[in-house]
Amino acid sequence: MRKYEVMYIIKESVETEKRGELMNQIAGFLTNNGAVITKTDEWGMRDFAYEIDDMKKGYYVVLKFEADNAAVKEFDRLMSINVNVVRFMITRDEAAEAEAK
């Protein structure tokens, strides 16, 4: 399994309770497909550099995880159709992979 990092932004309009449920659901997208989450880092509410779909703020979350390619593809698909996620980006965590060697 390779190491990955995903940053995603939740809409500002999502209430605090619902935000926690959404974060658990997103983590479940990964764990249900065999991934192992190694770190969750909540950056909190931040201003955007520019407006995205008439929004000026969003709740930022960074997850580090280990997964196979199939789990990452399914996660990408599920995040793309989630209406409460403004943006997301998945990258390979090459620094963590280099440290492990």
Image (cartoon, helix red, strand yellow):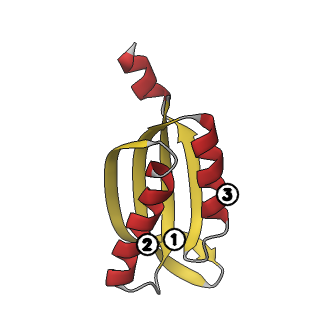
Q: Quadrant of the C terminus?
A: top left
Mark 1 Cα shell of 10 Å, populated few (<14), some (14-19), many (≥20): few
Residue at position x 56%, y 34% in the image? 68
Disc 3 secondary structure class: helix
Separation (CA) of disc 3 from disc 2: 16 Å
- Residue 29 location (% of width, % of height): 50, 57
Q: Which residue is mark 3?
A: 77
Task: Tell whether 36 sits left or right of 33.
Answer: left
Q: Are marks 2 and 1 in contact (CB under 8 Å)?
A: no
In the displayed image of the protein, which residue is found farthest to the top? 101
* Residue at x 34%, y 73% (from the top left corner): 20
Q: Quadrant of residue 46?
A: bottom left
Q: Looking at the picture, how far across and down is residue 12, in whole percent?
A: 46, 81
Disc 3 marks which amino acid?
Answer: Arg
Residue beneath disc 1: 48
Q: Calculate the distance from the C-alpha at mark 3 to the C-alpha at mark 1.
A: 24 Å
- In the image: residue 10, left or right of residue 80: left
Q: Nearer the viewer, mark 3 or mark 1?
A: 3
Q: Is 13 situated left or right of 51 in this image?
A: left
Determine the image quadrant of residue 96: top left
Q: Nearer the viewer, residue 71 or 79?
A: 71
Picture coordinates of residue 27, whole percent (x, y) = 42, 57
Write the residue at 48% across / 52% down: 32
Front residue of 98 and 38: 38
Q: Which residue is mark 2?
A: 22
Residue at 49%, 54% (x, y): give it.
7
- Whether pointer 3 and pointer 1 mark residues with C-beta atoms closer than 8 Å, the reply is no
